[in-house]
Image: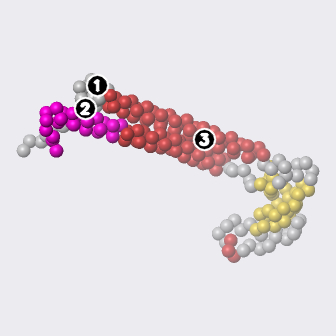
Amino acid sequence: MEASERTTVRWWRWRHNPLRRRVDVVEAWVVLAGWLLALLGGLLAGLTASAAVDRAVERQRAESHEVRAVLLQDAPGPSAARAASDNRVWGKVGWTAPDGSLHQEQARVPPRAPAGSAVAVWVNRAGDLTGPPVSGGEAWLHSAMGGVLAGAFVGGTVLGTLWLTRLALDRRRLAMWDAEWERIDTRRGWKTG
């Protein structure tokens, strides 16, 4: 038994072909435009998101700074339930804000620290407690992940739209074939099926 030979014709939608319909050419251009838009749009969205995260990190670094606070009362010992954490506990601290006003609030301090101990805390421009800014490695990770996720979302959205468009074009092509078969069968006076 002989093996059948199969020939693959590449770029057939752009070549001159008597069986090619207008919907085939439209589909070819839609696919090309969709992939280009997905790649370029995803890249642009990723770069934009990465730059936005970088700006947010820089703004956070500019708005917060470390100050020395004084522990106002003895800090409690570590809790047994917090054995896996950094072992820091809540204690009342006081500090002077950049405008000269005195502030008192609960902050994370080392366990069993005596009253009067110096503790480093992070404050914003208004002098209120805030968390420390992200480190260089964390900033890079946030920026990279924000860019990748934004790029993947935009690219996926475009490719999903492309898939729905191709589905609609396939339905149109099948309807055209059905109408053509109906016309041929009716002209000869008999039905095939």
Q: CA distance from mark 3 to mark 2?
A: 41 Å
Identify whether 11 is placed above or below 76: above
Camera-nearest label, 1 or 3: 1
Examine the structure image and report whether residue 180 is included in the region drawn in magenta. yes
First to last magenta residue range: 169-193
Q: Is there a contact, CB below 8 Å, between mark 1 and mark 2? A: yes
Identify whether 75 is placed above or below 125: below
Q: CA distance from mark 1 to mark 3?
A: 41 Å
Question: What SS does tag 3 mark?
Answer: helix
Q: Nearer the viewer, residue 154 or 148?
A: 154
Q: Earlier in the sequence, mark 3 or mark 2?
A: 2
Q: Nearer the viewer, residue 145 or 163?
A: 163
Q: Earlier in the sequence, mark 1 or mark 3?
A: 1
Looking at the rendering, which quadrant does residue 20 occupy? top left
Image-based side of 123 in relation to 138, left or right: right
Q: Is residue 16 visible?
A: yes
Camera-nearest label, 1 or 2: 1
Q: Position of residue 33 (x, y in %)?
A: 43, 31
Image-based side of 156 in relation to 168, left or right: right
In the rendered image, the quadrant that contains the C terminus is top left
Looking at the rendering, which quadrant does residue 84 occupy? bottom right
Specify the principal SS of the magenta part.
helix
Identify whether 24 is placed above or below 97: above
Residue at label 1?
A: 15
What amino acid type should be assigned to the residue bearing mark 3?
Ala
Residue at position x 74%, y 53% in the image: 132
Residue at label 2?
A: 9
Examine the structure image and report whether residue 186 is included in the region drawn in magenta. yes
Residue at label 3?
A: 49
Answer few, some or many: residues within 10 Å of disc 2's Cα (few below 14, many 20 plus, some between 14 and 19). few
Q: Is residue 118 visible?
A: no
